Amino acid sequence: MSVAIGGISSSGGKKTAEAIQKEVAQEIDQLLRVIFADLRKSGRLDLEAVEMATRTAMHQAGAAVLKELLQKSRSEVAREVACPCGQQARFHEMRPKQILTVLGRIYMQRAYYVCGHCHDGQSPLDWELDIEGTECSPGVRRMMALVGSDGPFEHGRRQIEELAGLDVTSKTIERHAETIGEDIARQEEAEVQRAIQLDLPEVNVADIPVMYVEMDGTGVPVVASETEGRMGKIEGQSARTREAKLGCVFTQTATDDQGRPVRDEDSTTYTGAIETAELFGRRLYAEAHHRGWNRAKRKVVIGDGAIWIWNIADEHFPTAIQIVDLYHARQHLWELSAKLFSSDPQQRLRWVKQLQQKLDAGKIESLVKTLHAFPPSSDELAKLLATESEYFARNAERMRYPKFRADHLFIGSGVIEAGCKTVIGSRLKKSGMFWTVRGANAIIALRCNRLSDKFQDYWESRRAA
């Protein structure tokens, strides 16, 4: 037989309200006594001290209120509850639990049940209050996710202490921020799996004039075990970083008075992880689909010359216009000229300006012809010229910049380059930081979610689940 857990009766509710009012009144009375005593003694009012004392008193009163509500709202206890194994778990005992809430620490008693079939135990109230397996309330965990995604965990600890008056450890912030990041990543992975199975829902949005996808990679410093067997960029040295791939999606509706494209305000969303290009391509496709890729009249992919970028573009965004970032292409010319004219800076400047004019004009075949005709002074320079010639020839159709400008399209990947610095670099690449791939991916997921302005939706969805 199962007895439903009871709520507060009307008479019980009245008594609870009276007890709460009394608790609050006592805290306020005690606070006022202290304030007026200090005022009489010093002759002046220390506003900051009064503010902080009032906050402390209100937190104490609020914690008492919360404790009273939790205890009184469960005046009746079920004899049995359903067990995940399919059987019934019977009431075993009342067990205490300490919870850190945004109002401070509280202690409560809740019913504990044991299943005679599988012998597992459970406290249903923990699940109901979203405190299963943790001693931190949802509100506190949210705070820790926010500060943990913004900066070093120790800095977050100090922020919570200063701004919320709560005493937590930096390790607690790390654990909860990464747990929430991992939960976000799991939801994203489920979306990616639906994309693979072509099971994504239709996105009901208005037609989009132009939608852009940009992607890039940036190294994240990791612990030594995460780079075992991986070679670094310098020959003979082990890798010290793992590449995080970051993608962004944004839209363009208008141009400025000179016909230059203008990115729609607040239209940029991010997704990323330390993972293979194959997995990242699926991730980025799912994000673009969610944003309404199929509703875009013009679709554009912008990136540097990395082959993995264009493989993803060909596979997942085959109808998109592909553009190599102009400034990255110019950088190729400047770096090449530094090797060809290392002892003659004036000749270097004349040569690179000549080729840059060809590049800006989209005359890539002429540029490649000039590179082929250059007489190398060594085998090393001959190899370098061949590599750069192949780079420009391979990307020729992605470098028709006059046409792209005439179509009022972006020709630079500044959005994703800034994203690599803002989303990943400013949080994961500070001095002394070394991550596990798991920890880095959790924080990347959390930061992408927040900087895409999705965190509120995520938090509400997890509460409703």
Image (cartoon, rainbow, N blue to C red):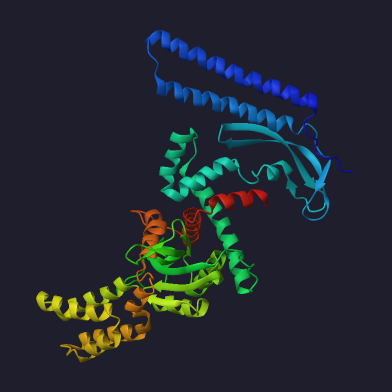
At which x and y percent is residue 451? 46, 54
Is 293 in front, or is 445?
293
Is 294 in front, or is 390?
294
Q: Residue at x 56, y 49 (%)?
A: 456
Answer above or below: position of 317 versus 156. Answer: below
At which x and y percent is residue 205? 58, 63
Residue sitting farthest toward the right: 1
Q: Give the mark count.
A: 0
At which x and y percent is residue 352? 19, 78
Residue 236 seen in this snapshot: no
Residue sitting farthest toward the top: 40
Residue 215 seen in this snapshot: yes
Answer above or below: position of 190 versus 443. Answer: below
Q: Residue at x 65, y 46 (%)?
A: 132
Q: Quadrant of residue 384?
A: bottom left
Q: Residue at x 47, y 48 (%)?
A: 148
Q: Is residue 265 left or right of residue 459?
A: left
Q: State the quadrant of the N terminus.
A: top right
At which x and y percent is residue 232? 34, 71
Is 400 in front, or is 441?
400
Answer above or below: position of 42 versus 111. Answer: above
Answer above or below: position of 165 versus 351. Answer: above
Residue sitting farthest toward the front: 257
Q: Is residue 357 left or right of residue 116?
A: left
Q: Residue at x 43, y 39 (%)?
A: 159
Q: Is residue 96 left or right of residue 259?
A: right
